[in-house]
Image (cartoon, coloured by chain):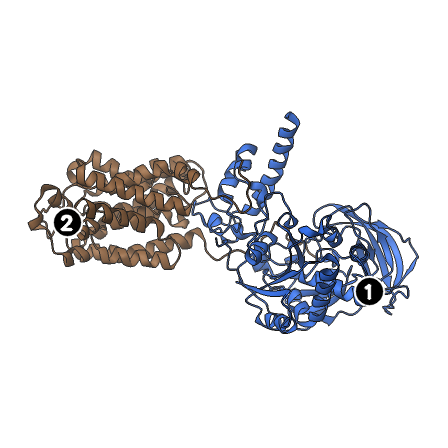
Chain colours: A brown, B blue
Amino acid sequence: MRKLISSVSPHINSPVTTQKIMLDVIIALIPAAVASVIIFGFRSLLVIGVCVAVCVFAEWGFEKLCKKENTITDLSAVVTGLLLAFNLPVSIPLWQAAFGSIVAIVVVKQLFGGIGQNFANPAITARIIMMTAFSQTMTTWVFPDTVSTATPLTLITKGETDSLPSLTDMLLGMRGGCLGETCAVALLAGGIYLLVRRVISWHTPVAFIGTVALMSLICQKSVPYELLSGGLLLGAIFMATDYSSSPATKPGKIIAGVFCGLVTVLIRFWGNFPEGVSFSILLMNILTPYIEKLTRAKPLGGIKR
Amino acid sequence: MKLHGTKVPHCKNTADMAPEALPVPKAVTIPMSMHIGKPSKPVVKRGDEVKVGTLIAEPDGYVSAPIFSSVSGKVAKIDSMKMSSGQSVETIVIETDGLQELDPSLKPPKIYSFDSLVEAMKQSGLVGLGGAGFPSFVKFAVKDLSKVEVVVINAAECEPYITSDTRTMLDKTEYIFKGIDLVKKYLGVKRFVIGVEDNKPQCVEKLREFGKNRDDVEVCVVPAIYPQGGEKVLVYNTTGKIIPQGGLPLNVGVIVINVTSIAYFGEYAETGVPLVNKVITVDGSAIKEPKNLIAPIGTPIKDLLEYCGTKCEPAKILYGGPMMGIAVPSDDCPVLKMTNAIIAMDEKDAAEKKPTPCINCGRCLSHCPLKLDPRAISRAYNAGSGEELEDLYADLCMECGCCSYVCPAKRPLVQTNKLAKALLREYKSKKEEKK
């Protein structure tokens, strides 16, 4: 008789793995990627390609240098690359996109311990750093066909509401903006896919978008334009739900969503920037450990001390 | 409030298979520790003739249980063996004569009062047959009977594969009710709730048919979500009562007993044959023909596997189901009192999953039936912080395995929780000392 394997229970595992979860996120991002190519042309594919390739390479290279176990097969670097690209204007110089990718993977993710350990969302943080470093190219909105346009949020800020695109165009994404954030239909389709696959829960996106809607209503702004503009859908569905940088408790997720919504409208309505989704998510990331601690459930039968 | 849980595969392949009697094994090895509490003391020596039901070991101390020979034959030796826990335990090895004669001194117990019921339960050798193996009479020896409001009969059988309780409900229904009647009469309990998962409609039907004219027995159908059979979970889902931290079901007026245990007690009261046989579900990816078998306690696992046939050499063999079962060191290990299944896994099923880094997805906490945070417990354990573990209620963990099961990173969370509980115990006792 050969030696039997001995291990602690349970002896079976669910088929879900980290890799499968990341693959689901990638699948959910594909509609928006396709839309970006249709809306902004093939250069968008180039930007996506550069970001994904550099992210994966940076992860591989960093882990190689540090003699850490290689994790590129978990596909999380691909997700970061996609999300970062989605947050860049299509006209971004490729070296800047590559720089952002390295910041996202090396500085924000790997230096904090790699997957699951980063306290801030790598793509969001890299985008904010790029906004500061390359403010010119990061706010040049080329659409359509090399004619510079302002984003709807800039138009709203300036009060030029007459030149806003139609709501149908807003839904389809035919507007100025970062390459992956404009097509609401594609983003919502991806969001529904993630909900169905139970990769994300509804709490954060609904609380986030709901808060923006409610605040827009109270402040007498156009609710549909506020919801469909900027990076709200991309941020609420794909970035604020990032596992490692957002609360894992259900009430925590709702608090995070409401908080993001409030900060977003604060910046949009009264701040210097036309858009505040990125900042709101980064701020929420920083508060995540506290939100989690405050919303920890009392276990069944647990006696308060 | 709805408790979390996990949908695990049911694999109840043997639910329709009436138990078959295993041929009498050549020899049985009966360990002295088949219950929670002190190991029993052998009262036979080498060369003694024993029959089925002969007392071979008596309880040592209060929380302990008598052990009876499961076969007729001769005591070959008093030996010791390493159990799956790693501890060495004294064993009695009996060579069988194949006759399986009953000990002539066996007669039905006289149950006429509360004390005689508890005594009979003790003399029957009954321990919690759901898997825990806590001597049953201790649970029923209640000091203040007025405190017992309800007896919850655990018939959830939420572990994958296992159908031995299912067979009890189908084949021994009258004994379940006989057991209930005895407890009702001598403990004065007025309410009985049988908790059954909704994946066993045939059992629900049979139990309802038997109990149709009774308002004291309620068959409560609960969703087949693991770990429905966890004591705290079942008590909450059937009665709404919450067992407090560190407390027993009795603290909230409940006694919980496994369905096979109560049926066995009903049968014992009628026949006087103590606990010597078990119905065992033999299944798993390495088994050719899954079956329910009636095996004498002490039968080596390999006899059961041989009888059912194996597709390949098993890579891992479990006492019990795949969620909470214990991996055995060898197929020489015997069937114990609380064994209800033997699961043999092939190489592929048993292959160890390599843990990858935690991605903080929160699946472990959203599936924990007790609402613990295994992710945080793991972090606190790694930091060696007893204080934090106390804050996280790590000691509440019942090791049901939901967290490890759902973890996409395949992290051994139950293992860490076990270690964390040990660390917390140490921390608490040090804290006590300081006071």
Q: Nearer the viewer, residue B144 or A274?
A: B144
Q: Residue at x 16, y 40 (%)?
A: A137
Q: Using the numbered discs, state the Cα–Cα distance from disc 2 to disc 1 in whole angstroms.
A: 84 Å
Work out which residue is located at the far top of the displayed protein and give it. Answer: B434
Measuring from the top left, give residue A43's x and y in whole percent: 18, 51
**What residue sits right under mark 1 in the picture?**
B273
Q: Quadrant of residue B29?
A: bottom right
Viewed as shown, does residue B90 lie left or right of B3?
right
**Given this view, does label 2 or label 1 mark the residue nearer the observer?**
1
Is A188 in front, or is B407? A188
The numbered disc on residue A176 is: 2
Q: Which chain letter goes with mark 2?
A: A
Q: Position of residue B233 (x, y in %)?
A: 57, 54
Q: Using the rendered image of the protein, determine whether residue B278 is visible from the camera's viewpoint.
A: no
- Left or right, B351 with reference to A176: right
Position of the N terminus of chain A, as image quadrant, is: bottom right
Foreground pick, A14 / B362 = B362
> Whole-percent x and y of residue A279?
26, 38
B281 horizontally vs B295: left or right? left
Circle 1: is it few (<14), some (14-19), or many (20+) Cα within 10 Å? many
